[in-house]
Image (cartoon, helix red, strand yellow):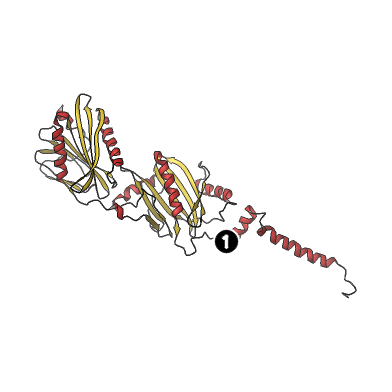
Amino acid sequence: MLSLLCLLTLAGPALAQDDESELYMADMGVTAVLPDGWTVPRWSDWDLDAVDRAKTVQVHVEYTHLQVSPSPEAAKVWVGMAADRLRDQGHERVEMASTEVVEIDGRPTAEFELTYRYKGDQDAVYYQRSFNVDSRTVHLSATAVRRNARRAEEALATWDDTLQIEKPPQDLSALPQEVASEAGFASLLPPGWRAPLNGELGVVRQVAADAGQGSLDKEKCWWGMHPYPDGEAAVLLACSYSLYTGVVDEHSWTGMEQQMRDHFFKGVEVPAAERVATGADQRFSFLYTLPDVGDRAVRMAATPYDRGHVLTYAIGKTGDTGTLDGAIRAVLVSTTFDDPEGGKHPIGALQWMEYYWTYRKTSPVVWGPILLLVGFFGFIIMKARSKPSYDDL
């Protein structure tokens, strides 16, 4: 039975280790130096399994995408992930014994302990340490039946000492909160959101692609993310879009909103947009709640500016719509434009005429010139019909 415990996760494609003592996991940039008395039945670019000589303790090394700073909130998520994995392996009564965020050799680390019944038969323990490397979060765990708990604790510390980190975590506080596009607009990312690191762009691209927005082009777009501890992320993405419309104000809103909805979502049931004041001049943006794409919730806003429209997307988990709604509204409010005239949307004379004739027929701008023309022609007709007097002759 003990040998089975040591092989809880020894499944899937792997490389067996015989003579090599340095085990490089390229996907996380970490090398494990094999301690004496340990063997590695499974090793890959993304994870590693090891067992001690007595086959009483199993160690596992893996990672999740994104550099998520260890915190009590993040630790709860990592505890849940570990507990789900134990349950999936057929173990019972999985419970959290302790969790804390500590510093180990100056490195912030989430450390926790789980207890469980191995296959419903014997009491067992599970220890884990989670810490950051560049663009990743590494998870190191050790598990054993209860009577070998001390060996598991010692194994966790031993393996932690052997791990050699290729690239240390980056300073997230140094990342700018303003994100800008070369297409002439910028915004401030709300609290909890940040610019992605280079090693995190793959996740951002995937989330954007899931919602049909796979392009990350600085000439047209800016982007930011809200990282989740499980390795996923919510994404904010704003891109320039070449669409020129007429006047958008309180008078034309309903008609223009229908035109925008027909343009972007023809044939798709999408609720009417919410009107959101944007930028310093409080111009109106069209904010749409789009149908979910799989497990992704999507919000889209269209904001007129001097080069067409800025399309802003908030894409994230369907269970986290509050975060998406708050984020896209905050971004719209903080939007600025590089244009010296404030990024005003260009409107031609014909569009102004159409606007007044369609939405402002009672405006003096419409009936004033008409009255002047009527008066002018009336005066001409009156003069033409009047008989010349003796004085005129």
Q: Which residue is mark 1?
A: 348
Please indicate whether residue 332 sits to the left or right of residue 102 in the image.
right
Badge count: 1
Furthest-right residue in this view: 390
x, y (%) of residue 276? Answer: 50, 49
Please indicate whether residue 291 sits to the left or right of residue 92 in the image.
right
x, y (%) of residue 255? Answer: 58, 49
Foreground: 357 or 215? 357
Question: Which of the 4 image quarters holds residue 36?
Answer: top left
Q: Quadrant of the N terminus?
A: top left
Residue 295 in view here: no
Q: Quadrant of the C terminus?
A: bottom right
Which residue corresponds to the image point at 51% horizontal and 60% vertical from the top-left?
Answer: 344
Three-letter residue code for mark 1: Gly
**Which element is circle 1 on?**
loop
x, y (%) of residue 46? Answer: 23, 43
Which residue corresponds to the image point at 28% horizontal and 40% vertical from the top-left?
Answer: 75
Which residue corresponds to the image point at 52% horizontal and 56% vertical from the top-left?
Answer: 244
Furthest-left residue in this view: 36
Which residue corresponds to the image point at 90% horizontal and 74% vertical from the top-left?
Answer: 390
x, y (%) of residue 157? Answer: 15, 41
Please indicate whether residue 355 sits to the left or right of residue 371 in the image.
left
Residue 377 in view here: yes
Q: Residues within 10 Å of mark 1 (few under 14, many from 20)?
A: few
